Image: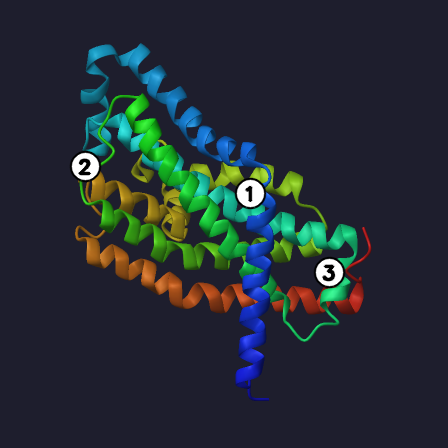
Amino acid sequence: MAVTSPQIRNNFSALLASTRTRLLIISRYPGQLVSDILVPIVIAAMPILLGRAVGGENAGAIFAQNTGTENYVAYMIIGSSVFSIVSLAFWHVAWWLRWEMETGTLETLYLTPTERVWIAGGTALYSMTRGILTALIAYVVGSFLLGVNPFQGELLLALLFIYVGLIPLYSMTLLFGAVVLKLKEANALINLMQWGIGFLMGTYYPITVLPPLARAVAYLFPPTWMTNGARSAILGIGYFFDTWYLDLAMLGVFVIIGPMIGLWVFRKVETNVRKNEGVGIF
C-alpha cells in the first residue's frame, strides 16, 4: 500500500514529538548532561596521565611509533569523545525500548498507526543531539584542561566523518534493540557491549595493534571509521585508504546497507516476539 502525504506528516510528527519529549525531560536534569561531559574527559585522562607517568618526556615519541602522532593527549580525547557518542546511542535506544516494555506502553504503540521505527527515530534524534553536544564540549574542555589545542587540523572534515557515521551507528542500535526485545534485558547487555565497542573502535589505540581476527571485525564496525576519520582530519595520522574521500566513501557504503539490515532484523524479531512470546512477558 502506498504511503500518502498525511501518513508521512503524521510519522514525522510522531518522530519530532518523541524527540521533543526526551529533550524536555533531560532539560530538567542538567546533572546528567554534566556527567555526559565529564565522563569522556575522565576516561581519557586516566591513560594520558599513566602515559606521562610511565613515558615521561619521551611519552609522545614512544606513542608516535605506532600511531603517527606524538599528540597522544588529543588522540585519546578524540577517541573518548567519539566513544561517548557511540555508547549513548546504544544506551538511549535500548533503554527506550526496555522502558516501553516494562511500563506496558510498547503494546499500546502497536495499536497506533505509527510504526515503532518512527518512535525509535525520535529517540535516535534526541540521542544524536545530546551526544554530539556533550561530546563537542567534552573535547574542547578536555583539550584545554590537558594542555592541547582543540582547534587544530580540519575540524569540519572531522565533524563530517562523525555525522555521516551516525546513520550506520543508529542502524546498529536497531540490531541491538532486536536483541533487547528478544532477551528482555538491557542493563547487562549494554554494560558488556559498551566495552566491546570501545575495544573494537580503538578508543585509546590504533586498531592495527589488534590481532588479525579482531582487526577484521573492527573494519566492519562503522564507529571505527568515524574515530579514525576524525583523528586523521585533526591530527593527520593517516586514513585507512590513504585519502579522506575513500574512507568517507566506505562510511557511505555503511550508510546504504546499515539501515536496510537494521530495519529488516528489527522487524523480523519484533514480529516473532509478538507472535510467539508477547511483548509484555518478562
Whichever of callouts 3 and 2 sits on the residue coming sooner in the sequence is 3
Crowding around mark 1 (Cα neighbors within 10 Å: few <14, some 14 to 19, many 20+) is few
Q: Residue type at mark 1: give it.
A: Ser
Depth check: 153 or 180 in front? 153
Distance Cα–Cα, label 3 vs label 1:
24 Å
| The disc label shown at residue 106, or none | 3
Does residue 217 appear to the left or right of 272 in the view shown? left
Residue under the image location 19 percent in, 45 percent down: 154
Answer whether labels 2 and 1 touch (C-beta < 8 Å): no
Residue to which mark 1 is pinned: 27
Q: Quadrant of residue 142?
A: top left
Camera-near label (3 vs 1) is 1
Residue 240 visible here: no
Quadrant for the N terminus in the image: bottom right
Q: Residue type at mark 3: give it.
A: Leu
Q: Residue type at mark 2: give it.
A: Gln
Camera-near label (2 vs 1) is 1
Depicted 196 relative to depicted 3: above or below? above
Does residue 45 appear to the left or right of 1 in the view shown? left
